[in-house]
Image (cartoon, rainbow, N blue to C red):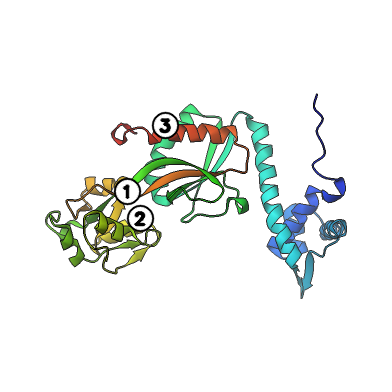
Amino acid sequence: MRKTHMIAPRRYLPSVSALLALEAVARLGSATEAARELDLTQSAVSRQLKTLEAQLGVTLILRQGRGLILSAEGRSYVDEIRLILHRLAQASVTVGTNAAGGTLNLAILPAFGMHWLAPRLRDFARRHPEVTVNLSTRLAPFDFRASTFDAAIHFGRADWPGAGHLPLLPEIVVPVCAPGLMHSPLENPVDILGFDLLHLDTRPRGWARWLRAVGLPDRPRQGMVFDQFSTMAQAAIHGLGIALLPTFVAEPYLSEGQLVLASARTSESIGSYYLVWPQDRPETKAMASFREWLAEQANTPQEASP
């Protein structure tokens, strides 16, 4: 039987109760409030903090008036221990529920999550009841090392540092507008430059790429800028201009007659979606199940999808 070694000497491993006390004081700025949250006495919290500082040989907490603030070393330390405490709690929940499944924390783009992923998740839940998927929206890439996410849905290129990736689908976009803005789709794409164009701040080159794809100079008119497709779609519905929407976002509005196609050119791609995950972590069974299922969904023709 192979022997295993201690992770670190015990003198470097503070108690979890001391770490919880430090995290609570850092967040609440008061030993009294921390004690109330942790169901301890104020003196007990203070003793744990002093013991922790003595163990580490570093000043973590400074008094400022009636409140408490973190030293520079304390701020850096708390950032690390928050991640550790979260992962410890997550591991405890996983081992206590189902070792073959567990929880998957996924960062998603709002429109992709709402219109493409969410309708399909019922199938994943049916096939993998042992896995719980938690979804949180993020509009831009982030550092996996400073987050608790297991994976993310990313738009752009497969260039996320330190991450593995699975191609999902290209983003096919269509220009749409309110029915009152034009009687029928524009036959000549150049005519679209005579209208106000709506822009998404995370796709600053979206219109330029579309114009280039249809053979026009990539110099779109300036217009209103939005942070999400949903708000840009509403602006288009209310006649504020032409929006460039992914087909999976535009389809419900088109079928209900709230929006109409603004151009006969409707099959241009301006980028792709990827599932990305940190490569420096061991793959959990929950992550493996989700990745394999998502690959299957990405290879399923849209018309056959739920």
Which residue: 27% across, 46% down? 251
Query: Dividing the image into 4 quarters, which one contains the C terminus?
Result: top left
Of 24 and 53, which appears nearest the observer?
Answer: 53
Residue at point 24% right, 66% down? 196
N-terminal of the two: label 3 or label 2?
2
Callout 3 environment at 10 Å: few (<14), some (14 to 19), or many (20+)?
few
Residue 192 in percent (x, y) is at 19, 61
Please tell me whether mark 2 sits on a helix, a strand or a loop.
helix
Q: Disc 1 marks which residue? A: 249
Residue 230: in sight, yes or no?
yes
Give the alpha-carbon distance from disc 3 to disc 1, as whole Å. Answer: 21 Å
Left or right of 291, for residue 304: left
Earlier-in-chain disc, 2 versus 1: 2
Q: Could you tell which of marks 3 and 1 lies nearer the N-terminus?
A: 1
Specify the amino acid type for callout 1. Val
Type of amino acid at the residue the image marks with label 2: Phe
Placement of 210 over or under 256, stated as above or below:
below
Closest to the camera, between mark 3 and mark 1, is 3
Q: CA distance from mark 2 to mark 1?
A: 8 Å
- The image quadrant of residue 53 is bottom right
Q: Residue furthest bottom?
A: 65
Residue at far top of view: 1
Q: Position of residue 263 (x, y in %)?
A: 18, 54
> What mark, if any, has residue 229 been given in the picture?
2
Q: Label 1: state its secondary structure.
A: helix
Q: Tell me the element at label 3.
A: helix
Identity, as a three-letter code, of the amino acid under mark 3: Glu
Q: Residue at x 82, y 48 (%)?
A: 13
Q: Nearer the viewer, residue 40 or 174?
A: 174
